[in-house]
Amino acid sequence: MENRGQAQNLETILVIIIITMILGIALIVFTNFNTASLETQRQQFQQQQSLSLLHSLPQHPQLQYTELGYDKAAVDATKLLSTNLTISGRKKIAITQLYPEKPEALCSLSSYPECNTYILYSNLPPTIRNQEIISLPLNLYHPKTKQQGFALLTITTYT
């Protein structure tokens, strides 16, 4: 009689251990799946945010070239020198003049207009695992020389 009771107790303990192991494995699988899903959603959100920024930035009042109160279809190069964009995230926003060709140099008040790269925002992570680069062509106007050129607005998002 006593052996039968001990056997039933042992069976009960084994069943509880097996059920606990199955629940533990299921919880680990669910957590991994949920983490992967959240990472995918975060990347999609960053892509949408960068695309939205890419299309709205050339029309930003701090950057747009205006003449006598009328907006022109160009970005003002002198406004790029003093622009402070308040953007969040690990990204770099740059405008590179392609035509007419200028010397390869970072633009500042001292090097303007003999430069070709304007950095509008830069927040680089300590280590770069992945990066996504999107770009858009735009017109760039230099009021100092009254010259219009062709440039490329590039947003690099880091993860």
Image (cartoon, rainbow, N blue to C red):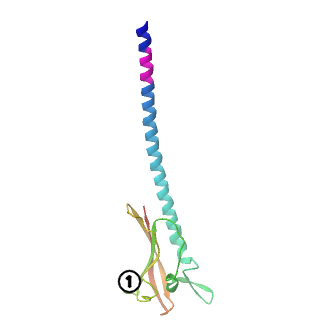
Using the image, determine if residue 100 lies above or below residue 135.
Answer: below
Using the image, determine if residue 91 lies above or below residue 10.
Answer: below
Residue ID at (53%, 72%): 55
Mark 1 lies on residue: 105
Residue ID at (44%, 22%): 13
Q: Position of residue 144 (x, y in %)?
A: 49, 92
Give the crowd class for mark 1: few <14, some 14-19, many >=20 residues within 10 Å.
some
Q: Position of residue 38 (x, y in %)?
A: 48, 51
Residue ID at (44%, 23%): 15
- The C terminus - image quarter: bottom left
Q: Position of residue 149 (x, y in %)?
A: 45, 86
Q: Amino acid at mark 1?
A: Ala
Residue 12 painted magenta: yes
Residue ID at (45%, 20%): 12
Q: Quadrant of residue 92?
A: bottom left
Which residue is the extreme one toward the top? 1
- The N terminus - image quarter: top left
Position of residue 131 in the picture relative to residue 47 (left or right):
left
Q: Position of residue 81 (x, y in %)?
A: 49, 83
| Magenta extent | 8-15
